[in-house]
Amino acid sequence: MPVLVTDRSAERTREAAGWVIAVLGGFGVSAVLSISGEPRQYFAGAWYMLVVAVASLVGGWRAGALAVLTASAGLLWAVLPPRRELSVDDAGDVGALVAFFAAAVVLVVLVRSRDR
């Protein structure tokens, strides 16, 4: 007997997949960047933005919001000096982190508007 998949269960599955992408993608990029040499900030930011975009496309705005948080924390931990710490030494790096966060939120909003 075939299993019927309702629209609601498919929606939940997509949202759960988006959450998984947000968490594993953000931590995965952080892990790769932390074992590499000194990563360039724009290069790392692009990878984190890709995680935000994919999580938002697959799982919706909630998964995108989680991806913004994991990507911002990952950028702070793996890229911005001092690396592997959740602190910032330079005021310019604070501005870069705020700009990244704002751009990632705008990306989630744009993806959300596409879904309407």
Image (cartoon, grey):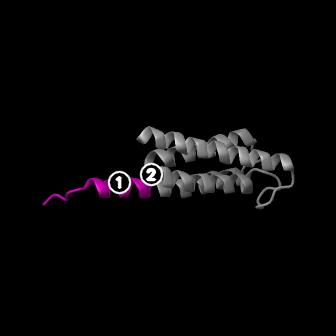
Q: Quadrant of residue 11?
A: bottom left
Question: x, y percentage for residue 113?
Answer: 47, 40
Q: Is residue 87 above or below residue 79?
A: below
Write the residue at 64% across / 40% down: 46
Relative to 108, residue 9 above or below: below
| Magenta span includes 75 | no
- Residue 81 at x, y percent in the picture: 82, 52
- Left or right: residue 19 versus residue 93 is left
Residue 80 as seen in the image, left or right of residue 103: right
Image quadrant containing the N terminus: bottom left
State the extent of the magenta-drawn residues as a range. Answer: 1-17
Residue at mark 2 to residue at mark 1: CA–CA distance: 8 Å
User: What residue type is disc 2 on?
Assistant: Gly
Q: Residue at x 49, y 41 (%)?
A: 111
Residues 108 and 44: in front is: 108
Among numbered discs 2 and 1, the one appearing first in the sequence: 1
Residue to which mark 2 is pinned: 59
Q: Is residue 30 left or right of residue 64?
A: right
Q: Which mark is residue 45?
A: none
Q: Secondary structure at mark 1?
A: helix
Q: Is residue 101 visible?
A: yes
Q: Residues within 10 Å of mark 2 (few under 14, many from 20)?
A: many
Give me the residue at 74% from left, 42% from top.
Answer: 41
Q: Give the residue at mark 1.
A: 11
